[in-house]
Amino acid sequence: MSTHNPPATDSDNWQHLVFGELKRAGVEIIAYVPDAAHAVAIAAANDDPDTTAVSCTTEEEGVAICAGAHLGGKRAALLMQSSGVGNCINMLSLIAICRFPLLALVTMRGEWAEFNPWQSPMGQATEGSLKLMGVQCFRAEQTEDVAAQLGAASDTAFNGDQACALILGQRLIGRKKWLP
Amino acid sequence: MAPVKRLKRRETVAHLLEQRKDALVVTGLGAPGYDVMAAGDHDNNFYLWGAMGAAAMVGLGLALSQRKRPVLVFTGDGEQLMGMGGLATVAVTRPENLVLIVLNNEHYGETGMQRSHAGRGVDLVAVAAACGFANSRRITCAMELDELCVDMHRRVDAIYAEIMIEADEPTRVLPPRDGVFVKNRFRKSLGFATI
């Protein structure tokens, strides 16, 4: 978004890895709630004729869309920000009780050099909330982690019908610039 | 204003499912699941027992992955109200094969028949139309129901169909609640193996 820094150092590279890795994992449906750190992947998903990109009003919709996609035999992924994890809690019971695979990519706020303290309560609870609902968490803190961790999360999810989240750390994403 | 005519939920759902052909079915939790189960269990039925608000979105994911088959979502007004944003998501995604069938008794039957927003003036047919559903309709008679039986197989536009039903509580007919079993059975019938 326009309020965001132009991607600095690491983010310049890592954002461009995500969509290709999702394609490599066989993902054909991408549900998302927009986030600046997912902007490159979201744009690529919308531009790719072989990918169905679904913009959601709230993240829990995306959880259920991923479940429905698996019922129909396609791989889906959910892109969201850490605040959205809180919106997903009860919907994750659908994933847990039916043992649906889930591949969620979560961009972090409220954990590293955060300017807006309103992001901190959910940011600090994000990984714990996911784990409480049975979602395995993988983390990437630097660009060289992203492809390997995304591959590990997608393999774990789709080969084992497991719920997995790749947490993309705020240090990887970089500082948000608020004022000129 | 004349009272709205109302159909009987069990007969209505059974009538639609008699003509399901190759349609895939998702139900919301509570009475719509009992109605679908009462019409006969089926490998291509997926029943939710929780995750309130999910039915239309599970249906959307399914519709996007099985585009050649109609996907019928049976749910209630209370469940759809909890997932109201999902109407906007379906409308902008435009899945041609998704049919949302909302059984509207204007009450939360499972929790003691409290009145829902649908019984307090919220018009979900108008909400769906405002979201962009080109095909949003209210059904109050057998003839309109028969039109839906035909239209649900057309796959030209997502459909929001709200069926006005009596606020009664027929005897529960419980669908299987082993989610892994129902999921694997559903996928197997489409040719997908388990892990």
Image (spheres, helix red, strand yellow):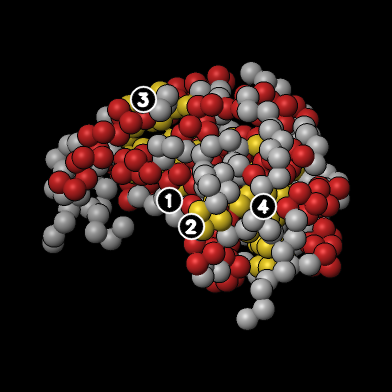
Q: Which residue is mark 1?
A: A58
Query: Upstream in the sequence, badge 4 or badge 2?
Result: 2
B168 or B173: which is nearer to us? B168
Q: CA distance from mark 3 to mark 1?
A: 20 Å
Q: Residue at x 21, y 40 (%)?
A: A121
For discs 4 and 1, the disc positioned in front in the rendered view? 4
Q: CA distance from mark 2 to mark 3?
A: 26 Å
Query: Upstream in the sequence, badge 3 or badge 1?
Result: 1
Q: What label does residue B168 carry, if any? A: 4
Q: What label does residue B85 carry, if any? A: 2
Q: CA distance from mark 2 to mark 1?
A: 7 Å
Give amino acid for label 3: Lys
Do callouts 4 and 3 point to residues on the same chain? no
Do callouts 2 and 3 point to residues on the same chain? no
Q: Residue at x 58, y 35 (%)?
A: B49
Give amino acid for label 1: Thr
Tell me if mark 2 has few (under 14), some (14-19) or many (20+) residues whose alpha carbon lies within 10 angstroms of its own.
Answer: some
